Amino acid sequence: MSTPAVPALRARQVNTRRRAALKYAIKRIVIVPISLFVLGSISFVLVFFIPGKPAVTILGDFATPEQVARVNQELGLDKPLGERYLSYWGRLLHGDLGKSFFTNEPVLDDIGKFLPNTLELVVLSLLVAVLLGLLIGVVGAYFSRRWPDRLMSGITSALQSVPDFFLALVGIYVLFFLLGWAPAPIGRLPVSASGTESFLIFGSLFSGDWETFGAAVSHAVLPVLTLGLVYSAYFAKTTRGSMGKALLTPQVEFARACGLPERKVVYYAFLSARTTVITYIAILFGSLLGGAAIVERVFNWRGVGQWALEGVLKVDVPVIQGFVIVAGLMTLTLFLVLDLLVLALDPRVSYE
Amino acid sequence: MSERTLDRRGSGWMFVRANPGIVIGAGLLLLMLLGAFFAPLPFDPVTPDPANVMLSPSGQHIFGTDSNGFDVFSRVIAAGRRDLPLALIGTAVSLVIGLLIGLPLSSKSRYSEGFMRALDAFQSFPLIVLSVTIVALTGNNIENIVYAIVIINGPRFIRLIRGEALAIRDGRFIEAAVASGARPRRIVFRHIMPNVVDICLVQSSLTAANAIIVIAALNFLGVGVSPPDPTWGSMVQAGAQGISLGQWWVAIWPGVAIFVAIASLNVLANGIQRRVEGG
């Protein structure tokens, strides 16, 4: 009697779940324009924190009042606040981020030039960090409370305690000065080479330009290793935690009871722990866009973080604004993709 | 000697045996602080000696000298005077902000949810760049690095304390307190706050570790530095050029000091965590 009712009930349950997921996804997407509005407004307000006048920053302390007035007019600073805010949004929506006070280069062009360098660095570093972190974390969780676990947690705490710029310098000393394996920390290519295209590594790999590729990779080894090692500690910690829990669940016991090989058992345990790792990849990606700045500076990598940092140190307002907007935009997009991905991968997430 | 003193000494040793992490971490930190303020230094940390520039470590200058002829050992020890108290102050301010904002927000009202979303958006910024901006803009003093520490760590405290307080609020004893007519303020201070002390202690030592990294990173960039006063970050920066030439001692020793300070705070945090969990 109840047999026909069961499939109908299940269908309805699945339907409700789907609808909840869809609702969540739509809600998540609707938030984006609101976040963008807040982001743009924050970047506008930033200017008011600047001590002194932008005109004085541009012209120096000995500018005459006429010069200051002229620059203020050029920047539109003589207009009322509401009008400035509106024209700011107008320019922003046309993709005009203004020009640097010092180099007079359009900010958007600069970002287009430097962002690919940072993206290459961050993607490769995260790759190293994830692989190394997963290895440390899984080994630690698998040999829980035995000596490999202690060793791995020791390595994790050590990596957590090293500032990235210090590890970079140690790396330069050991791998460049002592051993001579890595090239000097002077940028992305040797001085003699003149490749200035963006996406040096990925680009030369796809076009088969092995000479450039080899040079670019050897220059990338130290910065990638530095960031990869420092950030692997985060993955090691989260993986150790979530894998430790996953390996104690009944499903793992069941998998062992079924006689699956240990490799498979660990793999299945990892599947249930993977959303934490994915979440961490997104979070670290966002924070590395700016967080790599110091390492970029040490290796003169000419990335967007280094560019923004130098803008900040010179109080170059359009550069700061442009960086805040672009970095914020990328982080927002990333978190949106992340949330939708987790939604698709993990049926345990609730949508309320 | 009475039995009681023996007993107390015995229990002190028991504490050391049971909590090696707390003792080692706190001990190292205390040693660094005491050394920074009271240790007799072999050379004055801010007096240059042009006759002895870039000497490698030797019996007289055990950590060597830098390009100004400063004694690296004296400077590494003296830098703790600035770096360590600043990190502790930044941590204390972050903790207070976390308590003041996190505890009142520990309800599931629409406002508090909205505030948490705003906090999400704020934390998704590249905060190190934001904090460099703020320190650079508020005047290039080392004291202003406290703002940077608070901007990065305040939200973490808020999130942590709110989450913990939310969980505690579901407890029976809170229900009982409400039923017996306790005012909200009494519930928060008398019933909830004592229960978040543990995690606050753990988070505080993690925050102090992070604060030391933030201070060192900003000083490394030249933000908030007033030469010739030594700080670990600015000393690493001073040695960064020479490291490709093999003059490792100028940058490595202050780096080791940073590492030891952060590691002892992490060990302390682990020790407290273990004690709290009763493991």
Image (cartoon, grey):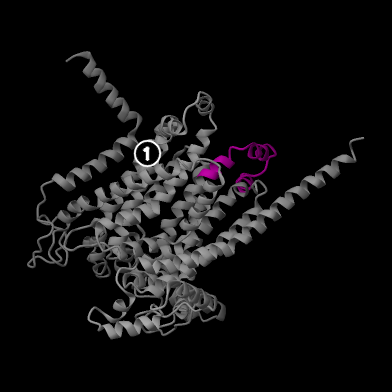
Q: Residue at x 85, y 44 (%)?
A: A8
**Residue farthest toward the right in the current orientation of the protein:** A1
User: In this view of the protein, can residue A301 be seen by the observer?
Assistant: no
Q: Which residue is mark 1?
A: B201
Where does the image place residue A149, in percent across and percent down from the top left? Answer: 46, 42
Nearer the observer, A60 or B244: A60
Q: Residue at x 35, y 69 (%)?
A: A312
Residue A228: image quadrant is bottom left
Where does the image place residue A109, in percent across and percent down from the top left? Answer: 47, 80
Where does the image place residue A266, in percent across and percent down from the top left? Answer: 60, 46
Chief SS of the magenta region? helix
Nearer the observer, A228 or A107: A107
**Residue farthest toward the front in the current orientation of the protein:** A80
- Residue A266 is covered by the magenta coloring: yes
What is the magenta range? A241-269
Image quarter of the N terminus of chain B: top left
**Residue farthest toward the top in the current orientation of the protein:** B2
